[in-house]
Every structure is written in C-alpha cells, then in structure tokens.
Image (cartoon, rainbow, N blue to C red):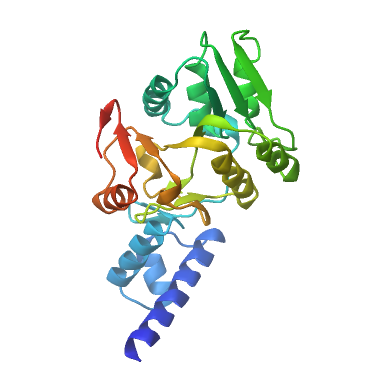
Amino acid sequence: MTSTVHDVLAERRHQLILRALRSGGPAAVTDLSEQLGVSPATIRRDLVKLEEDGLLTRVHGGAVVDEGDQPFAEVAEVRVPEKDAIAVCAAAMIEDGQSVLLDIGTTAFRLARQLHGRRLTVITSNLVVYEELADDEGIELVLLGGMVRREYRSLVGFLTEDNLRQLHADWLFLGTSGVRPGGQVMDTTVVEVPVKRAMIKAGDKVVLLADAAKFPGTGMAKVCGPEDLDVVVTNAPVNAATRSSLEEAGVEVVVAGKVQA
C-alpha cells in the first residue's frame, strides 16, 4: 500500500515538473524543490527518471523540455560530424543494385549524400533526400506521396502509408528521436509514427541510425521495439542497459566502423 501511494505521489510530482517546464516556469532544481515542497535530492531523482523516459533533458542545475520538432534546417546543423560517421558506416552496407528506403530526418539526409554515383533505387518520404538525389541519373528515385510537413520537409499521412504497402526495399534506414534502455524506438511527432511503422513492414533489413544523443534522447510515441530492428548504427558505445536489450533481441550494433554486439 505504501509503495502504491509513493508511486502515485511520484507520478503526480512528475506531471507538475513537466507542466512547470512547459509553461516557461522554473527550470532550476532549487526552484522546483521550493515550488513542489520536496527536497532537491527528490527533484534530482525525478529529473533522472523523466530524462530516462525521454520527457526532458537535464542541464546544469536543472532541466528543459523538448517543445516538439525543430525546423529541419536547425536540426541539420547539429552534430554533423557524428551523423556523417554514421552515414559512412551505413552506406558501406549497401550493394549496388539494391533498393534503399530512407526515413525522414537529418541523418538519413547525410546518408543520401554518401550514395552519389551508386547504382541504386532509393525510396523516400524525405524531401531533402529527394532534392539531394534528384539529379543523380544512376539512382532510380521514388518519392512517396502524402501531406507535406513543411517545417520538417517530410511527407506523411494515409497516402504515404498506402504507397509503402505497395513497395518493398532491401534496406530501411530509420531515424529516431530517442532509444529507451529497453531498446524501444521513440519519436516526438505522433503523425510520423504510422509512416515509420509502414516503412518497417516494407523493409527487408531495418537499420536504425542513432547518434549518441539519441540514447535515451526524446519522444513520447513508440515506433517499434528492438525485435523489429536488425542493426543499430551509432557513433559511440551505447549504455549497458540498452546494449543488453538490443543483444537479447539479436540486434547488431555497429559503432563507427566496428561491431559492438
């Protein structure tokens, strides 16, 4: 009974912390402690749990919440060397003549830049990938239909999903907002999730592209579990709990050119 009450109180406190952060309220541990009437140590434990759940990011002395997707142009400028290292590893997996399905996101765009001069079929809902490869005559380019998300340069909706049900690809390279310690792949934008799930069904081999910041990253919507992945490509060793979950599901983890699991 005591444990149940404690869990309810903690959940309520977590809700109040997130509400305070989203409303532009106090982000410092001391401010949150005073507002909620609990010790700074309790707040710090709460922030650790909420970060593990992908609901906020801890910063020095406090925390911030993710307010949703940033515009593509802004995200494209972040962690470029890390994304390029992942892209090089991923491109090396693909053989000429194969079909490749590229998800939305900036890491998939960096991968597209590695595919110039190859003889491939590339299928995508990523408008920036389309623009990158449109003039490469060696690549058969298939642009999925759908509603345009202008800020994030992607196509979504039932038309995109219907298109994917009619297609098959040798490889899917999937992006993510975050990966939970249990290996669950998450996304911040609910409208993208059905498209990602349809992509998983259309891909023979599913490769998750995730730089170190995606462990645990952010995201409230589950895309898939580790059992739906074949490979994870990252730029740094993942934490022990996540690595164990991926290993148990038979997922190969590739870190900057070397195999970790």
Q: Where is residue 245 shown, x and y percent of the image?
A: 31, 53
Q: Where is residue 180 shown, x and y percent of the image?
A: 39, 53
Name the residue nearer the viewer: 243 or 131: 243
Q: Is residue 236 above or below residue 28?
A: above
Q: Where is residue 56 shown, x and y percent of the image?
A: 44, 56
* Quadrant housing the N terminus: bottom left
* Quadrant housing the C terminus: top left
Residue 237, quarter of picture = top left
Farthest residue toward the bottom? 1
- Quick check: 123 left or right of 97? right
Name the residue nearer the viewer: 73 or 217: 217
Name the residue nearer the viewer: 135 or 249: 249
How many numbered marks appear? Answer: 0
Name the residue nearer the viewer: 110 or 8: 110
Residue 36, quarter of picture = bottom left
- Quick check: 237 left or right of 219? left
Q: Where is residue 241 shown, x and y percent of the image?
A: 27, 54
**Residue at the image point whose x is 24% and y is 50% from the top:** 240
**Residue at the image point whose x is 36% and y is 46% from the top:** 215
**Residue at the image point whose x is 38% and y is 24% from the top:** 81
Q: Is residue 260 above or below residue 258?
A: below
**Residue at the image point whose x is 52% and y is 57% from the top:** 220
